[in-house]
Image (cartoon, rainbow, N blue to C red):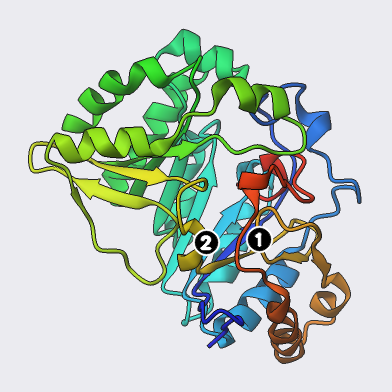
């Protein structure tokens, strides 16, 4: 079992397959796709390299793999990549995070490839506001893809980044929506990155305020599984859906960390806001998953106790498209 110096065990791998995104979200890449290109150039991991990575992490106890971006659906070989992850019988859960742009046309293929869970980024249920936030008039497509995922039996979650000026006023609309829609709606605190200092200062909202509201209205917390993500989830008997809260600025957020990240170019990031990634591309390309696993064990000792976001430290993370947030 992969374990760091603080006793934390890592069951969950977030694997970026591209750092390119076709949206222009105001909190991430407001200037568009050019800002999302890696300083090293795109040159993403191949399907074979992803297979080597997954075998190595599976041998270390990883049970859940999430493909992230950028936008994963921009990869033409995404289905073979999903199949490569699914080929490991030790991986119990295969997930993907997407902006939903191509979801209606691709979710069936992803499901056939073995996808268990999809997270769709929908920061507003108002079409005009959605367009303002993302730069695209595609809310209807994202919702259609979400409906199809539910019809296929795929565990479906919705990610909404909380922003004071853009969607905080929609809280009641979001709650009304999940009264009838069986998804987990995850409100994510806006995080400061290298590129969004001013936007963060004017739009950050604490998730604790929403948590107080939920508890007052009779919502109850769901017991976490060991491969669960960072969200604290809540359920209510009157609602078909659930609420999740991801509060990186909350007390002891890092104490329950169970996930590691790999960039699209094969760097191991021990934290989303680490000051560097460890380049493993050469050893990954060699195809020896046992040697790779041994190398990962050596690197895990450098994982720190916390992310230092409270001190304004953002590490190497210029924007969230780099590592999928």
Query: How far apart are labels 1 and 2 at the CA level?
Result: 10 Å
* Residue 118 screen position, x and y as percent: 43, 48
Q: Where does label 1 land, which residue?
A: 271
Image x and y of residue 109, in percent: 48, 50
Position of 29 with respect to 186 (left or right) is right
Query: Which element is circle 2 on?
Result: helix
Left/right of residue 232 with respect to residue 56 in the rendered view: left
Along the line of sight, which residue is nearer the eye, 286 or 193?
193
User: Farthest residue in the front direction?
Assistant: 311
- Residue 324 x, y percent position in the rendering: 63, 47
**Which is nearer the eye, 211 or 2?**
211
Residue at (71%, 29%) from the top-left corner?
196
Q: Which quarter of the picture shows residue 216? A: top left
The furthest residue to the left: 237
Residue name at image x 90 percent, y 46 percent: 39
> Most extreme residue toward the top, as rendered?
128
Quadrant of residue 67 in the image?
bottom right
Q: Is residue 181 visible?
A: no
Tag 2 or tag 1, which sits nearer the N-term?
2
Say which of marks 1 and 2 sits in front.
Answer: 2
SS for callout 1: loop
The x and y percentages for residue 230 are 45, 56
Check whether the beta carbons of the residues at disc 1 and disc 2 lie within 8 A of each other: yes
Q: Which residue is mark 2?
A: 254
Kindly identify the residue that appears in the image at 57 percent across and 12 percent down.
132
Number of other residues with Cα within 10 Å of mark 2, as a class: few under 14, some 14 to 19, many 20 or more: some
């Amino acid at each position: 079992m992969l374990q760091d110096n603080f006793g934390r065990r890592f069951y969950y791998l977030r694997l970026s397959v591209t750092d390119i995104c076709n949206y222009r979200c105001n909190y991430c890449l407001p200037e568009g796709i050019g800002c999302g290109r890696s300083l090293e150039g795109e040159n993403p991991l191949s399907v074979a390299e992803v297979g080597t990575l997954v075998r190595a992490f599976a041998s270390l106890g990883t049970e859940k793999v999430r493909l992230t971006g950028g936008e994963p659906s921009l990869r033409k070989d995404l289905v073979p990549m999903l199949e490569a992850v699914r080929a490991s019988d030790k991986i119990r859960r295969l997930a993907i995070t997407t902006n939903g742009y191509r979801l209606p046309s691709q979710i069936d293929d992803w499901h056939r490839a073995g996808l268990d869970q999809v997270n769709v980024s929908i920061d507003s249920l108002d079409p005009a506001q959605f367009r303002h936030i993302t730069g695209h008039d595609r809310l209807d497509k994202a919702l259609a893809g979400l409906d199809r995922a539910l019809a296929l039996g795929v565990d479906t979650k919705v990610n909404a980044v909380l922003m004071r000026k853009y969607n905080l006023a929609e809280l009641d609309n979001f709650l009304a929506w999940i009264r009838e829609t069986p998804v987990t709606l995850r409100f994510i605190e806006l995080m400061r990155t290298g590129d969004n200092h001013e936007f963060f200062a004017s739009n950050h909202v604490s998730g604790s305020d929403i948590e107080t509201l939920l508890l007052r209205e009779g919502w109850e917390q769901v017991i976490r599984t060991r491969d669960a993500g960072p969200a604290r989830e809540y359920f209510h008997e009157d609602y078909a859906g659930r609420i999740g809260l991801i509060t990186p600025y909350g007390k002891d957020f890092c104490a329950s960390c169970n996930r590691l990240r790999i960039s699209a170019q094969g760097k191991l990031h021990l934290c989303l806001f680490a000051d560097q990634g460890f380049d493993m591309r050469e050893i990954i390309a060699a195809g020896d998953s046992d040697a790779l696993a041994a190398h990962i064990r050596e690197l895990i000792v450098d994982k720190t106790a916390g992310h230092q976001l409270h001190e304004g430290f953002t590490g190497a993370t210029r924007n969230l498209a780099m590592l999928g947030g």
